[in-house]
Image: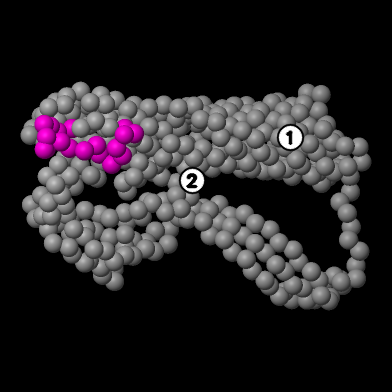
Amino acid sequence: MKTSGNFVHQTILGPALTGLAIAPPQNFAAPDVGSSQEYLGVTFGGGVEYALSNNWSIAGEYRATDFGRRNVILATAPAAGPILPATPVDTTVRLLSQQATLRLNYRFGGPDMATRSVAMAPPSSTNWTGCYAGGYAGAAWSRGSVDTFDPSTNQPVFGPPPFIQSPFYSGGSGLSATPAPYSYNFNASGMAGGTLGCNWQMASSNFVFGVEGEAGVMRLRSSSDLNPYTASSGFTDFTDSTKIGDWYGAVAGRLGYAVNDVLFYLKGGVGFTQVQTASLDTCITGANCNSQILLARGSANPTFGVIGGGAEWAFARNWSVKGEYLYLGLDANVPSCGPGGGRLFVPNLTFCANHLLDGIHTAKLGVNYKFF
């Protein structure tokens, strides 16, 4: 993906000082303004194909590719004299590509596709009915970055009138919600855990129904190098962090189709995990610092949907191995709140910041034992 932009930039000092313009409006754009980046995503879709003759067929297909939510640098705002240095201009975008195609195919050799009969899959040679327990290991990675906002308060910061500083960003809520966020990425995590479930296969049928629970450990961590809003003004002591885990669980239904000793299945249900967030400002000395350290913390135990699928191979009477992909639709907003120093006339304020999280991709290999 490549981005570019054309912006009009003007620096305003306020609102405490009635919105005083300290720099004239400036246009900035250039052929090389923007950024380009390669992303790894997940693709899924399907289609149908119709044989016109022995060698010719037509096909229609739909495919969606999801790259998650990403933070993109569009350009760099010019410096506004000695007060503000040059500042990156960024935005968050959700990257989802949808593609529909119509194709004409030519097949080289082989029997006549238009006249031969279609052979249905024979009944499965493995009976999947029964309950099982197993274990697995794999990897988890985030669908997108964490969007974090500069901590804000719903109380005035300066005083007395007429120099009352209005609340940062989101008046009345205590949670910054409307400004452009800054983002930082999760590190990928290993994961491992156990599975317990039961299957039911109808007589003389290839279809298998089941229910499955799993619980395990994973730990996705992310932290910002510096808060860019404070770093652009010369402060290098403000950081944010987010953690997903150390545990997670899911309960899901399964629908499968057995071919010989292999079961192909889809699954969907509900998941659980823990999220912890923090914002830390250690600036306590100097004219522009608060009178105490700001340490804002937050935690949540969100419930979310899960969906995925995989394949399982019965290599012995009671033993099978599987490979599975499962998407954890976290998509949570976890605020962190804590006391801060305040400024001048209003000490000991409570500051809060939102942390917006995307879903989690997981891929794992496992082994199951069917005990009856």
Amino acid residing under circle 2: Arg
Query: Is 344 above or below relative to 226?
Result: above
Looking at the rendered image, the disc whose residue lies closer to the viewer, 2 or 1, is 2
Apparent side of residue 63 relative to residue 181 in the rendered image (left or right): right
Please identify the quarter of the rendering in which residue 288 is found.
top left
How far across and how far down the image is residue 312, in percent? 72, 40
Apparent side of residue 152 relative to residue 260 in the rendered image (left or right): left
| Circle 2 SS class | loop
Apparent side of residue 143 relative to residue 171 in the rendered image (left or right): right
Please identify the quarter of the rendering in which residue 112 is found.
bottom right
Q: Which residue is mark 2?
A: 143
How far across and how far down the image is residue 81, in percent? 9, 55
Q: Which residue is mark 1?
A: 320
User: For mark 1, does the 10 Å Cα neighbourhood hold few (<14), some (14 to 19), or many (20 or more) residues?
Assistant: many
Q: Is residue 162 magenta?
A: yes
User: For mark 2, does the 10 Å Cα neighbourhood hold few (<14), some (14 to 19), or many (20 or more) residues?
Assistant: many
What separation in Å lies between label 2 and label 1 (alpha carbons)? 30 Å
Task: Give the quadrant of the C terminus.
Answer: top right
Q: Residue at x 35, y 30 (%)?
A: 336
Q: For the magenta stretch, what is the residue range?
A: 157-174
Task: Give the quadrant of the N terminus.
Answer: bottom left
Foreground pick, 286 / 327: 286
Q: Is residue 234 visible?
A: no
Apparent side of residue 283 relative to residue 148 in the rendered image (left or right): left
Q: Is residue 41 magenta?
A: no
